[in-house]
Amino acid sequence: MARAARDALLGGADMLQLRDKRDSVLEVARAAKAIGTLCRRHKVPFLVNDRVEAAVAAGADGAHVGQGDIAPELAREILGPRKILGRIGIRYAAGEIGKESRRVICRGRARLPDADKVGYKR
């Protein structure tokens, strides 16, 4: 994962998010720590998906939580007021977007357009 992160950073990524639903929190935190170090060198914000505790343990810039994950209010308490908190916004009407304490809202999928050029393999 660190190699893919490095390649994305060298390719111009301006934010990275680690998404790993299979590994343990400890394994995610270890990977997040390595990727976070790379991101800090490149001055690029780094988020951990779903695993707020791994984001805190690794010193990430924040976390992203989905609709079936930890409540955003609890995630905000754990992260603190200065960290980035992202939340998927598929089921939110326009008037509901500002009701929760988050700074990033995602809708749909993000994709690296030239993934093959930077060595990313699915």
Image: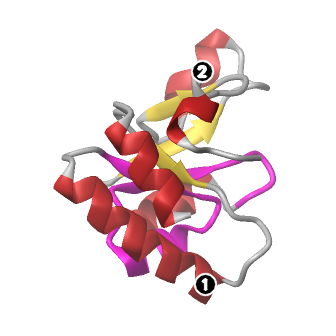
Viewer-closest of 66 and 35 = 35
Direction from residue 75 to residue 14 in the image, left or right? left
User: Where does label 2 land, which residue?
Assistant: 113
Regarding residue 106, the answer to whether it shows in the image is yes
Viewer-closest of 51 and 70 = 51
The residue most toward the top is: 94
Disc 2 or 1, which lies upstream in sequence? Answer: 1
- Tell me which residue sits at (73%, 23%) in the image: 108
Kindly check if marks 2 and 1 are in contact, taking CB atoms under 8 A apart as contact: no
Residue 37 position within the rendered picture, expressed as x and y whole percent measured from the top left: 28, 67
Kind of residue at disc 2? Pro
Say which element carries label 1.
helix
Cα–Cα span, label 2 and label 1: 28 Å
Kind of residue at disc 1? Glu
Residue 27, label in figure: 1
From the viewer's perspective, is residue 15 above or below residue 109? below
Q: How is the image coloured?
A: secondary structure
Q: Quadrant of the N terminus?
A: bottom right
Quarter of the figure with residue 95:
top right
- Tell me which residue sits at (60%, 21%) in the image: 113
Residue 115, label in figure: none
Direction from residue 68 to residue 38 in the image, left or right? left
Regarding residue 63, the answer to whether it shows in the image is no
Category of crowding for the residue at label 1, using alpha-carbon neighbours closer than 10 angstroms: few (below 14), some (14–19), many (at least 20): few
Category of crowding for the residue at label 2, using alpha-carbon neighbours closer than 10 angstroms: few (below 14), some (14–19), many (at least 20): few
Residue 76 position within the rendered picture, expressed as x and y whole percent measured from the top left: 45, 58
Q: Which residues are magenta?
A: 45-69
Residue 49 position within the rendered picture, expressed as x and y whole percent measured from the top left: 60, 56
